[in-house]
Image (tube, helix red, strand yellow):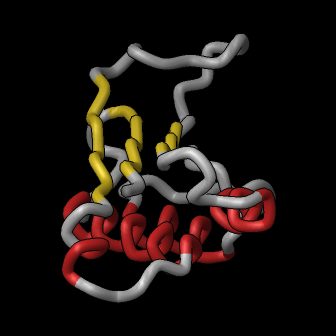
Amino acid sequence: MPMIDVYATAGTFTRKHQLAADLATAVMTIEQVPDIPMFRQNTAAFIHDLPPGALANVDGQTNHVRIQVLTNAGALDRRKQLAVVERPARRRMTQLHTTRNPSPSTGRIR
């Protein structure tokens, strides 16, 4: 069953519970498993708040979010893997659940 981990600086997301449910739903939908309790109750997302300064790129920017999706071997073929990272809902969910404004040019959080 998929497990989704989201890592971001504390305060990045305003509605963490809803974000977790939305991400779990999106991955379950992409995986195309039956909408039954066994899958609904075993597909989960975890939102991890990192303290300020706990993440940075080479330039020192801290406006990054890491999303890791773990599945059992073979659960997502290449097409489904691409759908997880390209899904338009990914950007929509990030925009809906962040406290910071996304940059209009990149969609990244400032």
Image mark count: 0
When the figure is inspected, residue 20 is found, relative to residue 64, above or below; the finding is below
Location of the C terminus (image quadrant): top right
- Furthest residue in direction bottom, as rendered: 35
- Residue 50: x, y in percent? 31, 26
Residue at left offset 41%, top offset 55%:
2
Q: In the picture shown, does residue 10 fall above or below 34?
A: above
> In front here: 62 or 74?
74
Location of residue 10 with respect to 22 vertically, above or below: above
Residue at 40% x, 36% y is 7
In the figure, is residue 21 to the left or right of 83? Answer: left
Residue occupying the far front of the picture: 74
In the displayed structure image, the side of residue 69 where residue 34 appears, left or right:
left
Pick the front one: 54 or 46: 46
The answer to whether 13 appears left or right of 77 in the picture is left
Q: Give the left or right position of residue 95, taking residue 25 as reference.
A: right
